[in-house]
Image: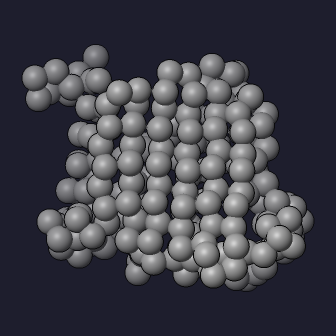
């Protein structure tokens, strides 16, 4: 099982990369005690039989991890969501991409903690050869959005160490702001 929300998000976005997506949209939104995550991609998609198998922890197509005989990612996200009073949905069609949506009731004792959101978004944006990933993060009424192409235009090569550090600072500052931890330009270390 994924230990954090970040683990679940990473699993789903990496699946989109592995499916050959060129455009990925990640909406990661908390409204009160409810977390809703949706990942939409334009990858190769799945037929009905593959969708069914993808939710079976004892099946894998072998593409993402050729050495593994099981595919635990989607089944674990589904289990975690349903276990804490949330929901899970998988929609896909060959040649039309995939949408995975899941929600957690964060007030539920079984809801996973957030994890390091800034580090996760930095890692996903720097994924080698990554598609144009668009991210929308929100905490109640505070939101920020960014696209991989915008970051690359502003920072250069997203896989370079110096760029990674700047990207992590960018995401850390935005995360602090949407969690309402910024007062007059300073992070409340509190």
Residue 156, how many percent across, how many down? 18, 73
Residue 151, how many percent across, how many down? 23, 64
Which is nearer the eye, 187 or 177?
A: 177
Callout count: 0
Query: Which quadrant is the C terminus positioned in?
Result: top left
Colour logic: one colour
Residue 138, how many percent across, how many down? 39, 37
Which quadrant holds residue 135? bottom left
Q: Is residue 70 visible?
A: no
Residue 29, how many percent across, how many down? 47, 38
Outermost residue to the left: 184
Report the residue at 29% width, 23% height from top.
Answer: 180
Q: Is residue 187 visible?
A: yes
Report the residue at 32% width, 37% height from top.
Answer: 143
Report the residue at 44% width, 71% height from top.
Answer: 23
Q: Is residue 112 left or right of residue 152?
A: right
Report the residue at 27% width, 70% height from top.
Answer: 149
Up-down relation of residue 78 to residue 154 (above or below):
above
Q: Is residue 101 left or right of residue 148?
A: right
Outermost residue to the top: 190
Which quadrant holds residue 52? bottom right
Which quadrant holds residue 12? bottom right
Up-down relation of residue 190 to residue 97 (above or below):
above
């Amino acid at each position: 099982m994924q230990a954090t929300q970040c683990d679940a998000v990473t699993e789903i976005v990496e699946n989109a990369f592995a499916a050959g997506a060129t455009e990925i949209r990640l909406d990661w939104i908390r409204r009160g005690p409810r977390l809703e995550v949706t990942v939409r991609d334009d990858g190769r998609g799945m037929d009905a039989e593959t969708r069914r198998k993808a939710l079976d922890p004892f099946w894998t197509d072998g593409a993402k991890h050729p050495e593994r005989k099981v595919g635990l990612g989607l089944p674990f996200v589904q289990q975690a969501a349903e276990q804490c009073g949330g929901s899970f949905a998988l929609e896909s069609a060959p040649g039309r991409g995939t949408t995975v949506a899941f929600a957690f009731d964060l007030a539920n004792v079984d809801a996973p903690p957030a994890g390091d959101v800034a580090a996760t978004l930095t890692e996903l944006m720097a994924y080698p050869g990554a598609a144009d990933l668009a991210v929308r993060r929100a905490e109640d009424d505070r939101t920020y959005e960014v696209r991989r192409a915008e970051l690359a235009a502003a920072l250069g090569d997203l896989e370079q160490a110096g760029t990674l550090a700047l990207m992590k600072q960018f995401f850390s500052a935005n995360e602090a702001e949407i969690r309402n931890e910024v007062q007059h330009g300073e992070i409340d270390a509190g």
